[in-house]
Image (cartoon, rainbow, N blue to C red):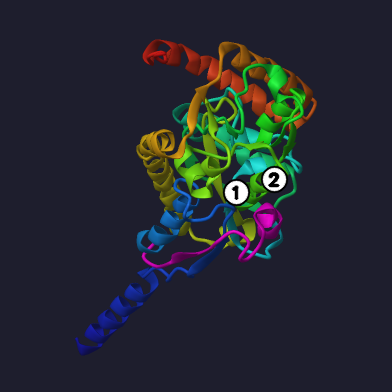
Amino acid sequence: MRKLAVLAVAASALVATTAAPAAAKKVLLKTPIAFATVLPGLGSTIKWVGDNIGTNSGGTVKMKVYEPGKLVAPFEILDAVSSGKINSGYTTAGYWIGKMKAAPLFSAVPFGPEAGEYLAWIHYGNGGKLYQEMYDQGGFNVKVIPCGIIAPETSGWFAKPINTPEDLKGLKMRFFGLGGQVMQKLGVSTTLLPGGEIFPALEKKAIDASEFSMPAIDKRLGFHKLVKYNYFPGWHQQATLFELLINKDVWNGMDAQQKAVTNMTCMAATTNSIAEGEAIQFDVMKENVEKNGVKIMYWSDEMLNTFRSAWGEVVQENLSDPMFKKVWDDLSTFRAGYDLWEKNAFLPRER
């Protein structure tokens, strides 16, 4: 009887040992970012992820965020993550337009979807699948996770009113993504600068005008001190999506729970980013007008039609790239279906 008891205890110990899950290998995501954490909705979003992912994962996934340029330069993040120089990075796909023509379609689309429609395509259409496919076909060893979105940006800051298409010709302007190609067609010389370099460029007259982001973000960069005409709507960026890139070898080494927590924390961060962005714009716009001498301008129908027409030409030129065409066709199909809902469900803008 005693022997049986001993065997039972031993068997119980063996079952307990074999049944206990192996402790997950801890992962530290060292994450350089393209946008300073003081910029609400941009850098603040990945700071939010870094502040919460450790708690959400029970300490098995942690993130250390590095301000722009502290570990790698903003425009070097993709290559650095892919090569394994760093194991993760936070940025936006529009920065990779020189590497993959389709990349800006996963960042901001001129006259494109607003935030709700964009996220619907990414998470419940084919957007997310195509997003990863683009990086895979491009030869980049990264896992991409949508991790933040903001609502419309301003259309730019100008030193003087822009009343006709002729007023754009000859301007030197910081401009992002596919919208930059539109502006080039209208005679604007565009350059893509990181946020921290825009104010000095305006101050030194290296550029005449700039777009960057939403009013509360632009305020932090001080554009209102140099240029006073702030144009709306942001036809070039009705919504802007951001990405967490993780080296694929690192991602594949994470267990299912760690992957799920990372995905869910980014989805929560996306909700937080859109809510924060929508909450803080109007006070800044009011202050710009009442205290900073800023004039809020709204593009005329003539100008919006001019931008839209030039955008059509840009699309046709980019369709020669197979991946751009594949993504554009899928997004267009989704939007055509969504249009039935949008036209019937939403109120038109009051003017």
- Amino acid type at mark 1: Gly
Nearer to me, 221 or 106: 221
Labelled pair 2, 1 in contact (Cβ < 8 Å): no
Q: Quadrant of residue 349?
A: top left
Q: Quadrant of residue 308?
A: top right
- Amino acid type at mark 2: Asp
Quarter of the figure that contains the C terminus = top left
The numbered dot on residue 195 is 1
Residue bearing mark 2: 136
Residue 199 x %, y %: 61, 48
Sequence-first tag of 2 and 1? 2
Answer whether residue 283 is magenta in the image.
no
Circle 1 crowding by C-alpha within 10 Å: few under 14, some 14–19, many from 20: many
Q: Residue at x 46, y 11 (%)?
A: 340
Q: Is residue 69 above or below residue 170?
A: below
Direction from residue 89 to residue 101 in the image, left or right: right
Q: Residue at x 29, y 76 (%)?
A: 12
The boundaries of the magenta stretch are: 57-81
Direction from residue 3 to residue 169 in the image, left or right: right
